[in-house]
Amino acid sequence: AVAGDGGPAGAALVLRRRLRPLSFTILYVPKGPCLDAADAPSVERMLDALEALARRERALFVKIDPDLPLSCGLDEPVDSPPGVAFRDRLAARGWRFSADQIQFRNTVLLDLAPDEDALLAAMKQKTRYNIRLAARRGVTVRAGGPADFDLLAAMYAETAARDGFAIRPAAYYQDAWQTFADAGMGHLLLAEFDGRPLAAVFLVSDGERAIYMYGASTDEERQRMPNYLLQWEAIRWARAQGCTTYDFWGAPDTFDERDRLWGVWRFKAGFEGRVVRHLGAWDYAPRPLLYHLYAVLMPRYLDWLRARAPE
């Protein structure tokens, strides 16, 4: 934590991994540091502290990932002055934009201030049609709970296999979902047809923001468009909780069909949220040569492991 005139002015949670058998570490600040980017003295104190920690912990690098917008908008992005100033300050101090991004750099935010009719009216016509189609075709949405977490884990694994992305063991997700549920921050919604589960979303409420953090679906009854109705009910739930923003949690790095998130983006774009581009992950390397070797050799090593992995 760094102190300001009236108390704490910023904080950073630093995760550490030791690179055994070497004596070096790597440090990561997920979605942080948390501070007022316009408070230049606090920013400098925080970066001083992180750089000193990196040297003290014999880190090859410390990676930060601030939840800080750099610009907003899709076709003609408008710069966010605090984000631009923070980026320029990092570059001036020798931090580097990281080739290894951990979080989604871009996301889509939906303003929940309008009433439900206005939100529906603002959506793309096809999205609005599919929401109503799902309801007409018998899709229902219910709230879930911890008893449904095994079902959610199985559905998430099916989604990963179908869409070709890697996931962690089921116990990891069970722990995350249960932790959020116990804290009163997690909420599960399930879309069903004839009593059979078709899709699910796990939402996390954080102050006035609701985050669509996990989504899963089966291959059954996809013509009934369950994901559209499910997402709409998630938005309605967020409004009912008093949230003012719905975070769709992820958008393409580049908005063209070659991006791995293009299919996901086409679905999210129909709800007519606002694209927000974040600062992304930046690294500070006390040992530039070792950092360079790690940055070059580690991707090659991972590619070699993937090549040896069974189909």
Image (tube, helix red, strand yellow):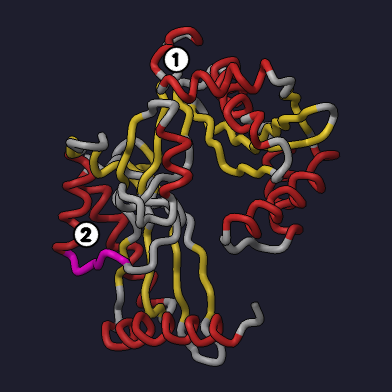
By secondary structure, the bulk of the magenta-drawn segment is best described as loop
Looking at the image, residue 258 sits to the left or right of residue 168; the answer is left
Q: Label 1, on which residue?
A: 119
Q: Residue furthest front?
A: 223
Q: Looking at the image, is 244 positioned above or below residue 185?
A: above
In percent of width and height, residue 35 lies at 34, 43
Of the pair 56 and 176, the residue shown nearer to us: 176
Q: Label 2, on which residue?
A: 90
Q: Residue at x 25, y 67 (%)?
A: 96
Q: Residue at x 37, y 59 (%)?
A: 64
Q: Residue furthest bottom?
A: 21
Of the pair 135 and 180, the residue shown nearer to us: 135
Element on which disc 1 rests: helix
In this view, the mark in front (2 or 1): 1
In percent of width and height, residue 106 lies at 36, 46
Q: Looking at the image, is 306 positioned above or below residue 125?
A: below
Looking at the image, residue 49 sits to the left or right of residue 73; the answer is right
Separation (CA) of disc 2 from disc 1: 38 Å
Q: What range is drawn magenta here?
A: 93-98
Q: Where is the C terminus found, in terms of image quarters? A: bottom right
Q: Residue at x 76, y 30 (%)?
A: 192
At label 1, which amino acid type do we have? Leu
